[in-house]
Amino acid sequence: MYNHDKIRKLKKAGWTLGLLFLVILCFFVGFSVGKNKQKAAQKPVKQEEVEKKKDLSTDTVQKFLVAYYTRKDLGENRNRYEPLVTTSMYNELTTEEKQPVNLAYKGYVVNQVLDSANIYINTEEDTAICVVTYKNTQRIKIGTDEGALKNQSNQEAVQLTFTQQGKKFLVDKLEPVTLTTLLNTDSNSYNTNVTTESNYSDQTQTTTTNSTTLSTTEGSSHE
């Protein structure tokens, strides 16, 4: 015969051990979940970095002007301004250089250098108005400076339109403009800081000028 008392005691002990095991299991599960939540709460939230838009700078404009207006002869400076312009702009500039009206001066208008540049930048439109003064030598005979007119000063105003490719600003359009000076023109979106650099010196002067309005004209001469 079975000992019913012993069986009841064994069953009771089994239930007790089972409940104890469940309590311990629940405790560890709860402890683990709470610890993970605490770690998650303490984990710093990585803030999304927003890259600030880089503005067109005077240095970028000046670098192009030096490369474009400084040349020993027509087309000699292509390798210097090519990295600073878009492919379409480069093709347009080289095509213009090949025009008969410009080729006629090849060998006669030489040793051109940028003398100074007043630069007006519109950072919203990525454009710059540049009043450029450059000097050159005008020969009467190819290959010799005998009788040539040296250090002939020329001035023109151009509007440069830039496009941003990666971290670089490249010239995408160049067109001649005329400047009309007005006082307190609210519609003017160009800043009033003018940077002048003469004879490629490292000293840059910044002055304040009146507001300007701009209009595009047809045709230009870079000789």
Image (spheres, helix red, strand yellow):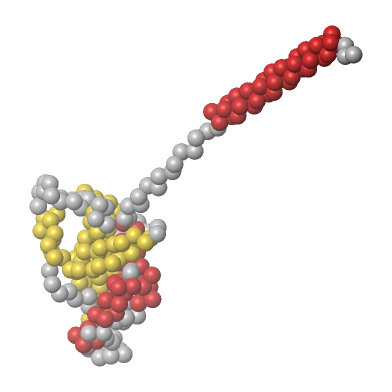
- Vertical comparison of 206 with 133: above or below: above
The residue closer to the viewer here, 220 or 43, is 43
Toward the top, the furthest residue is: 5
Toward the right, the furthest residue is: 1
- Vertical comparison of 184 with 147: above or below: above
Give how far across and how far down residue 144 sits, in percent. Answer: 30, 89
Give how far across and how far down residue 188 sits, in percent. Answer: 15, 51
User: Can residue 104 be seen?
Assistant: yes
- Residue 6 lies left or right of residue 118; in this view the side is right
Toward the front, the furthest residue is: 1
Which residue is rendered at x = 69% and y = 18% of the image? 23
- Vertical comparison of 117 with 82: above or below: above
Which residue is rendered at x = 83% and y = 13% of the image? 7
Which residue is rendered at x = 22% and y = 50% of the image? 191
Kindly indicate the quadrant of the structure image that contains residue 219: bottom left
- Residue 208 lies left or right of residue 167; in this view the side is left
Which residue is rendered at x = 28% and y = 87% of the image? 107
Q: How many marks?
A: 0
The residue closer to the viewer here, 42 or 69, is 42
Quadrant of the drawing holding the N terminus: top right
User: Can residue 115 be seen?
Assistant: no
Quadrant of the drawing holding the C terminus: bottom left
Kindly indicate the quadrant of the structure image that contains residue 135: bottom left
Give how far across and how far down residue 90 sits, in percent. Answer: 31, 74
Give how far across and how far down residue 27 sits, in percent. Answer: 67, 20
The residue closer to the viewer here, 182 or 83, is 83
Kindly indicate the quadrant of the structure image that contains residue 75: bottom left
